[in-house]
Image (cartoon, rainbow, N blue to C red):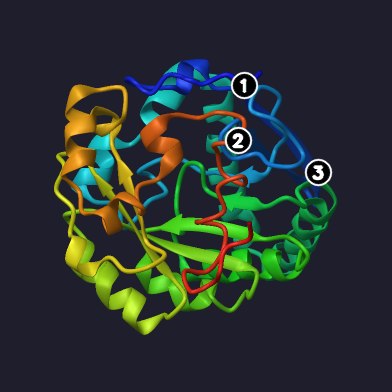
């Protein structure tokens, strides 16, 4: 029997979170996870860690007014403070690591090895946070290359660092867009074929003219299936755009409706998705 989590308001209070400490040179980093994103190595109610996260906004140099206003991590900070504390630790520690090229290389190998053995189903970068520097983007690519047998995925508004991320062939880059930065996202996807636009809307407005096959639409809480406004919004979309709406965010999480069983963000936009 599967359990559908609430879609009204925040679901952070009813989401299962998890974390594991990864020891390495001169300290440790935390790998986190939750019932939405874990796959193969965990379930909706008993997830296993498969993500590396930082702080919201502070570690999001290219955030927009729209994403800051609707950031779900604020609710996570409130309802899962212990998990959020791990993000704060990672935020400080990764900067210390990146300041020393030798240490950064050692840590890329350590984390890549951990991912290979513990997150074979897929690894997500940043439940919270984003790429904050070119050095960090290159380090992410190195970690991915040290875990080539694992499919990695990321959502990012840090478009200047996308070319560095794309040097890792097993990392799918999803460009996070909204009404504030959709023009920059459109330019970035044209320069970087294989990336996709993941468009977040909080008021029902969608720049449908920029969306193509493989792109995804993420509705904010007020536009989800549990609300009258959300159902009206969905019905107003053209059939091709209805198919782009994230089924997990719109309809709510369930054992077979979460990242992994839904593969659309885990593979490049031009890829025929596995069945």
Distance from label 1 to label 3 (Cα)?
A: 35 Å
> What residue is at 58 percent from the left and 19 percent from the top?
3
- Residue 202 visible, this angle: no
Please report whichever mark, 1 or 3, sits nearer to the chain's N-terminal start.
1
What's the mark number on residue 82? none
**Structural distance between the alpha carbons of marks 2 and 3:** 33 Å
Label 1: element kind: loop
Residue 167 percent location from the top left of the image? 58, 79
- The quadrant the N terminus occupies is top right
Alpha-carbon distance for marks 2 and 1? 8 Å
Q: Which residue was labeled with disc 3? A: 23
Q: Earlier in the sequence, mark 2 or mark 3?
A: 3
- Taking 16 as reference, is 148 left or right? right
- Classify mark 1: residues with Cα within 10 Å, few (<14), some (14-19) or many (20+): few
Residue occupying the point 27% across, 54% down: 239
Front-most of residues 244 and 59: 244
> What SS does tag 2 mark?
loop
Q: Earlier in the sequence, mark 2 or mark 1?
A: 1
The reply to whether callout 2 and callout 1 are in contact (CB within 8 Å) is: yes
- Find disc 1 in the rendering and name its residue: 2
Where on the picture, by quarter, is residue 72?
A: top left
- Left or right: 64 as drawn, with respect to 45: left
Q: In x, y percent, where is residue 181?
A: 21, 61
Q: How many marks?
A: 3
Of 54 and 104, nearer the camera is: 54
Circle 3: is it few (<14), some (14-19), or many (20+) Cα within 10 Å?
Answer: some
Q: Tell me, for residue 256, which label it has, or none.
A: 2
Seen as rendered, the residue at the extreme front is: 239
Provide residue 211's location: percent of width, then percent of height.
27, 65
For discs 1 and 3, the disc positioned in front in the rendered view: 1
């Amino acid at each position: 029997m599967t359990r559908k989590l609430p879609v009204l308001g925040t679901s952070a209070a009813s989401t299962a979170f998890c974390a594991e400490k990864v020891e390495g040179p001169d300290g440790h980093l935390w790998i986190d996870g939750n019932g939405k994103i874990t796959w193969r190595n965990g379930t909706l109610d008993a997830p296993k860690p498969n993500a590396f996260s930082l702080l919201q906004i502070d570690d999001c140099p290219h955030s927009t007014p729209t994403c800051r206003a609707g950031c779900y991590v604020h609710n996570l900070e409130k309802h899962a403070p212990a998990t959020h504390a791990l993000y704060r630790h990672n935020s400080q520690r990764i900067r210390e690591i990146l300041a020393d090229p030798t240490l950064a290389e050692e840590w890329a190998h350590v984390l890549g090895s951990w991912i290979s053995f513990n997150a074979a189903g897929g690894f997500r970068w940043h439940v919270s946070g984003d790429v904050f520097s070119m050095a960090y983007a290159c380090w992410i690519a190195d970690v991915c290359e040290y875990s080539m047998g694992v499919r990695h995925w990321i959502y990012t508004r840090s478009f200047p660092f996308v070319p560095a991320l794309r040097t890792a062939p097993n990392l799918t880059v999803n460009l996070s867009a909204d009404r504030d930065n959709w023009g920059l996202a459109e330019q970035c996807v044209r320069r970087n074929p294989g990336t996709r636009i993941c468009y977040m809307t909080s008021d029902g407005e969608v720049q449908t003219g920029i969306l193509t096959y493989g792109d995804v639409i993420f509705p904010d809480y007020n536009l989800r299936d549990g609300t009258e406004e959300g159902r009206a919004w969905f019905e107003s979309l053209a059939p091709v755009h209805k198919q782009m709406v994230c089924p997990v965010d719109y309809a709510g999480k369930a054992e077979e409706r979460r990242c992994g069983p839904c593969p659309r963000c885990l593979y490049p936009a031009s890829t025929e998705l596995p069945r």
